[in-house]
Image (spheres, rainbow, N blue to C red):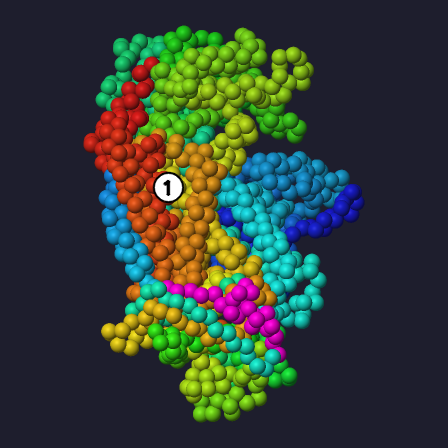
Amino acid sequence: MMASSYNAKEEDGHHSGPSSHGGAGAVKSKKPDNTAFKQQRLPAWQPILTAGTVLPAFFVIGLIFIPIGIGLYVTSNNIKEFEIDYTGVDVSSPCFSCAKNYSWDSTTSCTCSVNFTLEQPFESNVFMYYGLSNFYQNHRRYVKSRDDSQLNGDRSALTNPSKECEPYRTSEGQPIAPCGAIANSLFNDTLVLYHVDSNGTKISIPLAKKGIAWWTDKHVKFRNPGGNDNLTIAFQGTNKPVNWRKPVFELDPDDRDNNGFINEDFIVWMRTAALPTFRKLYRIIHKKSSSTPTLASGRYILDITYNYPVLSFDGRKRMILSTISWMGGKNPFLGIAYITVGSICFFLGVVLLIIHHKYDSRNSSADIPN
Amino acid sequence: KEPPPGAEAYIPQRYPDNRIVSSKYTFWNFIPKNLFEQFRRIANFYFLVIFLVQLIIDTPTSPVTSGLPLFFVITVTAIKQGYEDWLRHKADCSINECPVDVVQRGKVARTQSHKLRVGDIVVVREDETFPCDLILLSSSRQDGTCYVTTASLDGESSHKTYYAIPDTMAFRTDQEVDSLHATIECEQPQPDLYKFVGRINIYKNKEEPVARPLGAENLLLRGATLKNTQHIYAVAIYTGMETKMALNYQSKSQKRSAVEKSMNAFLIVYLCILISKAVVNTVLKYAWQWSPDRDEPWYNHRTENERQRHVVVRAFTDFLAFTVLFNYIIPVSMYVTVEMQKFLGSYFITWDEEMFDEELGEGAQVNTSDLNEELGQVQYVFTDKTGTLTENNMEFIECCVDGNVYIPHAICNGQILSAASSIDMIDSSPGGYRREHEDLFFRALCLCHTVQVKEEETVDGIKKGIHQGRPTSFYISSSPDEVALVEGMKRLGYTYLRLKDNYMEILNKDDEIERFELLHVLNFDSVRRRMSVIVRASSGEYLLFCKGADSAIFPLVISGKVEQVKARVEQNAVEGLRTLCVAYKRLSESEYQEACRHLTDAKLALQEREQRLAEAYDVIERDFVLLGATAVEDRLQEKAADTIESLHKAGMKVWVLTGDKMETAAATCYASKLFRRSTQILELTKKRTEEQSLHDVLFELNRTVLRQRSISGLSVDCLDFGLIIDGATLSAVLTPKQDGGAGHGNYREIFLEICRNCSAVLCCRMAPLQKAQIVKLIKASKEHPITLAVGDGANDVSMILEAHVGIGIMGKEGRQAARNSDYAIPKFKHLKKMLLVHGHYYYIRIAELVQYFFYKNVCFIFPQFLYQFFCGFSQQPLYDTAYLTLYNISFTSLPILLYSLVEKHVTMETLKREPSLYRDIAKNSLLRWPVFLYWTCLGVFDAVVFFFGAYFLFDNTTFTSNGQMFGNWTFGTLVFTVLVFTVTLKLALDTHHWTWINHFVIWGSLLFYVIFSLLWGGIIWPFLNYQRMYYVFMQMLSSGPAWLSIILLITVSLLPDVIKKVLCRAMCPTATERAQSTPCPCLTVEPSTIFMLSQSSSRMSF
């Protein structure tokens, strides 16, 4: 009886045997159950990684990876990509003066034109990107400086944005919509593309601005506040971000449904990039007919309304034209990586085969000691 | 009671009440005290600090990420401890409230146990347990004695006699007892059960008080039970937590396993890595943002508040923020998982059917689950002999009278002797003289003992003991040897019936009852090593029978066939039998009176009673006539030899520590294969040191050992030395030399050096404390080996507590060893499975658990570290908060927990068949620094693959077929997906034992990750203030290159480990790996049959 009181005192009193908590008829049968689990005899598959078993796997991996890699590599090489830097760092570059004379409060916008030649025609849909370098969209202070409920159309968040938006939360006593550093630094260069045909005439190339943002972002995650009848009223009592020229409900003068928080350029910008050098989808050039290439080879002019300063932090701006395959844009890395890994596996398979032959015979002859 | 006036030097003392408090908490202090206890653990404290830092400063991850797991861990632990404490409260309560009878104002009043106070006079009835430590005042027996069993205290089931104080012995009624006026002086409470010194002052009629000494024989201990005595009166002197029992059960010191030690070492390394990572990042951050355009570009301004902060404060905050960002490298869940693994894993030991003993009706017990893996690390096994190696089930083998051998036939204790020995009575024509000695001899054995006869115990009216054709009465005694002798006599035709009214009744060969009056018992003690009785036969003659150890009897013998008996005794001893010699002497009337006078004088002596009794015994016990000798076998436990052989093969050194004499112990050692015939025995005994000096003997032995080693070269294991040392020599070796002459140096070192080269050591004639000393000595030697002690009796407790792992055998000598041990097993043979199978499994399981935990967190956190180089050292987390929180808690927790519970890299049969596999994991081999480094490097490699793989894929390119771009959260999710899959598949590669549970848990947790991610990104969660994960996972899965890169990166991450495994296995396979690849050996000879042969032949084999 006394013993039972002290069993609980021992460190692990829980199963200290018969004497403890013996009141409840525990004497019945202490023989452990003969179940497979309790006796640790569950039926099991017992694989062992030996040279013999791993060999085929290596060959199979090699045989699968190398063709995939070649496929990826060829696909990647077939993708046409054209990239042009228009930052205007060099004196010779057309945008040098715009870049040089940039000031935040200038009312007139600076424009410049960049000429370039496409050596090869771009056959399928062409995607137009702008690229920024040395721009830390993934800086922590920057990433969190947004209010998702405001962007989701929450009225209370519209007038009282999250603290995270500081110091871009209020201006002139009014809440900023959309608040935060990300929205404030919205990319606002305008890029227009012209084709110069053999006659020397500039033909404007139609740039579609729909479909550049994720569908779910455009339709679910981002919503304008209130009933979206009149955005001017909906955004009353808020102020535009300090760096913006026009308020959020006037971002797209051409398309009423592309204004406010659901402006696609805005949504694209709000998806912060993972790395300091990044590109973002700007426009899509849809293929018109099957007979003519989307962008024929020849001379082109890129008209830039130069609003976005990057030289202060040593950044670069680029315009990229790219076709897309099933595997996305040009990326030789994946193909090369697949080929490399496949070959290594194959090579290792051969090495293991040799080892297997050499050591297996030795092992089988030598008995287990003891 | 109030001290009478005039009691000088009385310092009033506060006595506790008789409440037993084993619980730790009360209802009120539970929360603060439990929290305090929990946060005293360094790991919990670390997480608390991280949590507080997250609360106070602006950190990259929300406090939830560390607060939630911490809260979970703390709550679970608190609930567990709270429940255990509640159980303790309940147990305490039932004890504190059990009724006790107290004499108050001349009447017996019933009260509750916890209301007892020091000085209360208590009435205890038969079969009741004493409620506190009591001084016996009077008993219902005439002679003022009472019988007590202390089985629950020290495991001795025999009845012990306690004595009342002579002056109070006569009290019979409550009134008489209540009229007693006395004070008791006693020492402060102390835990030694067998020591008590006190004095009682009895005041009678205003005379000078009568002082009587009190000793341990007057003290009834709490927890003991009154037997064969109707009732007693006793006064309480120690109550509650001051009773000897309560003092004895103070919590034992915690043992820590080697794995835990290396885990803590790894932890410190990781802590250093964590801090250095944070420091590096902080320094780089400030170097990088030296130019203000980087620090604060126009698109990313600080708030006014931040700007105004001092740069040192900012740097420190940044450091803390980095620490928080990387803190997952030391996962809170590791501790939880390790504890769960140990707790749940220990159930496999209790559940093990093979370790269940039908006879005892009990299986193995786990008293602490902290040491499971230590069972796989044992290097030294210290075992007791009697009851551990042997059955402690004595069996009468033979007796010899004057050199003629008598062997009782066939069956004893249900065990059948081998046919060869069942020859009945080898003696030939008994002559008159012989006849007389024979009769005397058998009578001596029937009379000279302290065996009690227990009459047919009735249980519910059904007579127990009738079945199996057993006698309706059976013998009980504190010494199994005596029972064996009396039973042996019974089989030779002389049955001891009972002790009735001081007459011992014997049923002799001719079915006549002979009655002898028992006059005196000269009890056995370990100094004299013999006992005697003085009886008066019906013929009126006085006889003194004595039995005892040969060394105790032969010097006292004056006639008899000493030579023949001596030869027989020696032969028996060599065969491993326990021998006793029997002698007698006739006493004349005057001699008897003389003896009586000596004895009564001594018994009545107040001072030095023990010594005077011993002197009286010496006077009486001499001038014997030798009758003969007996031989009793203590049979080896089933499969003891097989077990020892296995332990040897497993690379363990087995030491036998016993109190037995050298010849017997050595014989047992040969029988149990501890010493083989090839073993060269080195003796370090008193006999040898008497001839040479200890110094010379030691050096000579050392030379022998070293010479042998230099001859055999590197293969030290092959040669076989056995060392025999006895207690006296050992203490000579261990006591540091005072004189410090040249060359004396330190014997300890030389002794250790010799021991290190011996595969087996036998220490005989050891005192219990010496056993612990030996263990301590080995523990402290320079390799710090892991020791295991196994024993069954109270005398093994000290060594069980001292060793790294203490194992108790649930034996005949009570439960004390089992209760003080870490693990208790029914039989010695179970040690084999315990160590070779369970220990081995637990070790590889926990080793993998620990290494894997560090590995998976390196994989987890290192990409975050790398990411800092690409996000301007801004502490931007790579993964979403949910992933950060759940990675360790749910995505990767179950597979490793399950692995650590059910992994079996080789089958149980193989482990049992090939003990040498145990060497593969010896010396913590799976947790050594190179292995740890390998795992960490693997983790770093994998992390680099994840991060840079994703980096190059993401680098400035489109990932989708519709031209849309992914952001940083997709990047993180890609890395995280690869991470979860790689880490889980790595475990899958390590798993050698795929049960359906493994499949379920491994594939299930991957599936859970996918489903969770789909769900987490599938809904705009209203309670979150950010929706950054919305559709990220689905968008990623809709992209072909993402799939391809996930597959590629997983393959690349797993490749090196697979190659390493395959190459190691092919080039230099370990024994374990070889055992794995040979699945099923053809029929090997059953080791048990070999054992049985050796067992039966062992007695004659050398």
Q: Is residue B252 something one can see in this rendering? A: no
Residue B654 percent coordinates (x, y) = 43, 27
Relative horizontal placement of residue B1026, taking residue B693 as reference (left or right):
left
- Foreground: B1025 or B192? B1025
Q: Which residues are magenta?
A: A81-105
Relative horizontal placement of residue B453, taking residue B612 as reference (left or right):
left
- Foreground: B927 or B283? B283
Residue B868, relative to residue A100: is it above or below?
above
Examine the structure image and report whether residue A96 is included in the region drawn in magenta. Answer: yes
Q: Residue at x 38, y 38 (%)?
A: B840
Q: Tell me the chief SS of the magenta region.
A: loop
Q: Amino acid at mark 1?
A: Tyr
Q: Residue at x 44, y 39 (%)?
A: B931
Q: Residue at x 71, y 62 (%)?
A: B310
Residue B283 percent coordinates (x, y) = 62, 53
Quadrant of the image occupied by residue B457: top left
Quadrant of the image occupied by residue B1019: bottom left
Residue A229 percent coordinates (x, y) = 44, 92
Please give the residue where the numbered disc 1 appears in the rendered image: B841
Instruction: Farthest residue to the front: give it.
Output: A199
Residue A109 percent coordinates (x, y) = 55, 79
Examine the structure image and report whether residue B383 is included in the region drawn in magenta. Answer: no
Quadrant of the image occupied by residue A104: bottom right
Q: Given the image, what chain letter belongs to the residue carrying mark 1? A: B
> What SS does tag 1 mark?
helix
Crowding around mark 1 (Cα neighbors within 10 Å: few <14, some 14 to 19, many 20+) is many
- Foreground: A327 or B170? A327
